[in-house]
Image: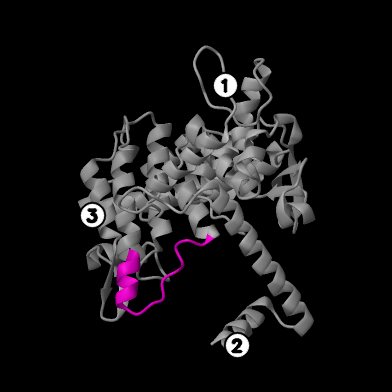
């Protein structure tokens, strides 16, 4: 199962994971990778030198990974160009001193990027002047309407920029309007007869849950908790010891990636029995390392060796239990819009693991069938669907 990771989670993780026993890219290599990104900022688009310089200063001082710097730079430059086209002035974050972006501007940004069906095509609700201006600047060149995840990510970039600048940002506003972004996308696509993606697949559900996690201690733990619950039972997660995890890096296709390994002590079910050794690689491992870095500091201070622990008063971090884990996942599901009007949701720790195992099993069977037929997995999937109809 491939998990989509949002920009702010990855940036926070990369910043923290260096503390968690990782063999990250060397400083000279990082500097070499950073040059293209910083060179891009220096040139800017449309003469935005002040904004580019501000982004350089803001991001480089945070010692983020080169790839993360490039991602944040692209997001903030997009915000600046949109703001200039909408209001005729640069984004207020680049002012001296920087000031928070107004709530009206955030609402206008969301309104402009909502989907609408026009002339048989999906477009954004912004004026043609803004749309054409963004396209001339090199943005949204291949699409008439960006996907909800793109708008969601750009909002998270703005939120993170406010946090780095010690400015207040109304997270509640974004949380309230996020369902509207996705609802308009699905409704307008349905109006055009476009098949909607299954909202309750394991991949989509995990992505939605990760998208509502904050970047504080609680949110960082939530991210790691969600990822582990796709592989382990609540009891296994609650009993997971810090010393059982082996963080590090691996090289895949010439690229050095974060990795975290775990051998399950008492496997349960088909997947755990057949694969008792779990390896998280790439973005998932980076996010787990982020929580590991925070938890490691607490363990060093003499607390229990539980990998997951709630933050409590009086210098104590109680371990998690099944009831608390179930309540936490239900709460995150409600925040992600995965619950009905009464607040009930099918998403639970057990559902996450079973859904992951189901997708793994389907993928495994597809691979076997494709190899036997000497065709690709896409071809065998299409043949399977045709046979069912």
First along the sequence among labels 3 and 2: 3
Q: Residue at x 60, y 27 (%)?
A: 319
Q: Is residue 107 left or right of residue 254?
A: left
* Camera-nearest residue between 294 and 34: 294
Q: Which residues are magenta?
A: 185-201
| Marking on residue 317 | 1
Is 269 drawn above or below residue 192 in the view shown? above
Q: Are marks 1 and 3 in contact (CB under 8 Å)?
A: no
Crowd class of label 3 (few under 14; some 14 to 19; many from 20; radius 10 Å): some
Is 249 drawn above or below residue 244 in the view shown? below
First along the sequence among labels 2 and 1: 1
Q: Is residue 296 left or right of residue 185?
A: right
Residue denoted by label 3: 86
x and y percent of residue 210 in the render? 49, 47
| Marking on residue 387 | 2
Q: Residue at x 46, y 67 (%)?
A: 198
* Camera-nearest residue between 144 and 44: 144
Q: Residue at x 35, y 50 (%)?
A: 79
5 magenta-colored: no
Which of the 4 quarters of the picture holds residue 266? top right
| Whole-number angstrom distance, CA of label 1 to CA of label 3 | 48 Å
């Amino acid at each position: 199962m491939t998990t989509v990771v949002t920009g702010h989670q990855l940036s926070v993780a990369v910043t923290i994971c260096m503390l968690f026993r990782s063999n990250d890219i060397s400083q000279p290599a990082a500097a070499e990778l950073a040059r293209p990104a910083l060179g891009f900022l220096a040139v800017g688009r449309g003469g935005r030198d002040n904004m580019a310089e501000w982004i350089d200063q803001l991001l480089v001082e945070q010692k983020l990974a080169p790839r993360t710097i490039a991602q944040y730079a692209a997001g903030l430059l997009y915000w600046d160009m949109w703001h200039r086209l909408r209001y005729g002035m640069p984004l207020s974050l680049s002012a001296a001193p920087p000031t928070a972006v107004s709530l009206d501007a955030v609402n206008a940004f969301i309104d402009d990027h909502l989907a609408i069906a026009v002339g048989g095509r999906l477009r954004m609700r912004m004026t043609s002047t803004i749309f054409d201006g963004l396209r001339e600047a090199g943005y949204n060149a291949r699409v008439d309407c960006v996907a909800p995840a793109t708008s969601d990510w750009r909002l998270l970039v703005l939120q993170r920029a406010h946090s780095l600048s010690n400015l207040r940002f109304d997270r509640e506003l974004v949380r309230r309007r996020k369902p509207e972004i996705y609802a308009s996308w699905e409704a307008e696509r349905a109006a055009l007869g476009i098949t909607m993606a299954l909202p309750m697949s394991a991949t989509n559900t995990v992505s939605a849950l990760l998208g509502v996690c904050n970047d504080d201690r609680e949110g960082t733990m939530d991210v790691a908790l969600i990822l582990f619950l796709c592989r382990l039972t609540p009891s296994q997660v609650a009993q997971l010891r810090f010393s059982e995890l082996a963080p590090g890096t691996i090289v895949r296709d010439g690229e050095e990636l974060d990795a975290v390994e775990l051998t399950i002590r008492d496997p349960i079910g088909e997947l755990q029995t057949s694969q008792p050794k779990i390896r998280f690689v790439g973005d998932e491992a980076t996010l787990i390392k982020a929580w590991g870095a925070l938890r490691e500091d607490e363990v060093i201070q003499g607390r229990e060796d539980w990998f997951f622990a709630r933050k409590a008063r009086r210098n104590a971090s109680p371990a998690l239990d099944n009831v608390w884990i179930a309540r936490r996942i239900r709460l995150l599901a409600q925040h992600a819009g995965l619950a009905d009007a009464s607040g009930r949701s099918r998403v639970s720790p057990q559902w996450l693991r079973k859904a992951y195992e189901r997708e793994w099993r389907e993928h495994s069977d597809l691979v076997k069938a494709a190899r036997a037929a000497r065709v690709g997995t896409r071809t065998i999937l299409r043949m399977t669907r045709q046979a069912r109809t």
